Image (cartoon, grey):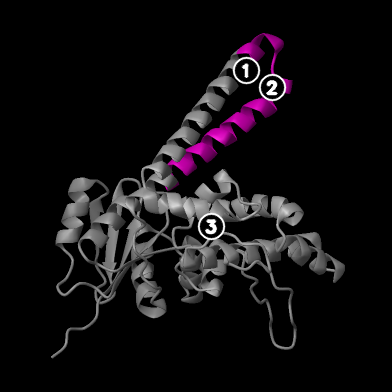
Amino acid sequence: MSETPVWMGIDVAKAWLDMARSDETAVRRFSNDDEGIAALVATLPTPAPQLVVLEATGGLETAVTAALVAAGVPVAVVNPRQVRDFAHAAGTWAKSDALDAGILALFAERMQPPARPLPDVVAQDLAALLARRRQLLEMRTAEQNRRAMLAPRLRPRLDAHVVWLSQQIAELDRELDQTLRESPIWREKEQVLRSIPGIGPVVARTLLGELPELGTLERGELAALAGVAPLNADSGQRQGRRRTWGGRAAVRAALYMAVVSAIRCNPTIKPFYARLRAAGKPVKVAMVACMRKLLIIANAMLRDGVLWAPPGATA
């Protein structure tokens, strides 16, 4: 007699991990530290659950996800908005850690999102460095914006802080370079991305760190993951305007900056953008279409391991 499949959900908080199973109503709580994670893994059923679903929580889920993957458990880290929309559709509007864990288990069973492997150590390092770099850039911008409203006697201190932040950003850039240099595979990936006109070092590193699936997915799935896939908004006979939403904000921001450059220098993106504008497409629509096209190009090049070649070029 075959075992009944078990689907599980884990709600992640800074201090706690609440775990629910699809075949039970009880929710178990573990501390979100090495000891608690080890205890959680030890309580997993045998054979392993069909899938464990967690929400992306800005890094709080990384340790438990790594432990589950190391234990051979299929794991999917999903967008919190997807789960919240699913909960509303299921008639659950209340929110608590225990309820969230149960909803995640139900989401795993009903939606069965694909399990994704945890990015390798280099990808995790890149993601951490990039996240810290974004934080420092935001702090520097905030300080620079405050300067005009600050009393003159306080400005030298602010200026010193801005200089320090700039030095920290420069150090992170050097660490990013070192991280890539120490990994031949990732160095080759960066070279492929940087060969594309419009993609510079920061964009290449952001794509590698924030979208490690690049080069392994189909174009539609990748565009949705990055948040540049147009989604329908139709109802009955009404056809609403398609729009993009969700996805990974850091990836979209990087793609936007790349396209700003690519519409001037990339021999594929530049005429594509011009055709869209000539056809009456708004600037925003044309830009998003170019972001999607640039992402698809990068995905195909990484998949095939080839450098950029101008249109019409022959080997």
Please report the bounds of the magenta region as a residue range: 127-156
Was residue 172 drawn as part of the magenta stretch in this picture?
Answer: no
**26 left or right of 174?**
left
Q: Earlier in the sequence, mark 3 or mark 2?
A: 2
- Real-space Cα separation, disc 1 to disc 2, in angstroms: 8 Å
**30 left or right of 275?**
left
Q: Main secondary structure of the magenta part?
A: helix
Q: Badges 1 and 2: C-beta atoms under 8 Å apart?
A: yes
- Real-space Cα separation, disc 3 to disc 1, in angstroms: 33 Å
**Can I make out residue 9 in this image?**
yes
Q: Earlier in the sequence, mark 1 or mark 2?
A: 2
Q: Secondary structure at mark 2?
A: helix
- Real-space Cα separation, disc 3 to disc 2, in angstroms: 32 Å
Q: Residue at x 34, y 64 (%)?
A: 117
| Residue type (three-letter) at the residue carrying disc 3 | Arg
| Residue type (three-letter) at the residue carrying disc 1 | Asp
Residue for badge 1? 159
Q: Secondary structure at mark 3?
A: loop
Residue for badge 2? 147
Q: Position of residue 66 (x, y in %)?
A: 28, 55
Residue for badge 3? 248
In this view, the mark in front (3 or 2): 3
Q: Position of residue 235 (x, y in %)?
A: 68, 83
**225 left or right of 312?**
left
Asked if 299 appears above or below 158 in the picture, the reply is: below
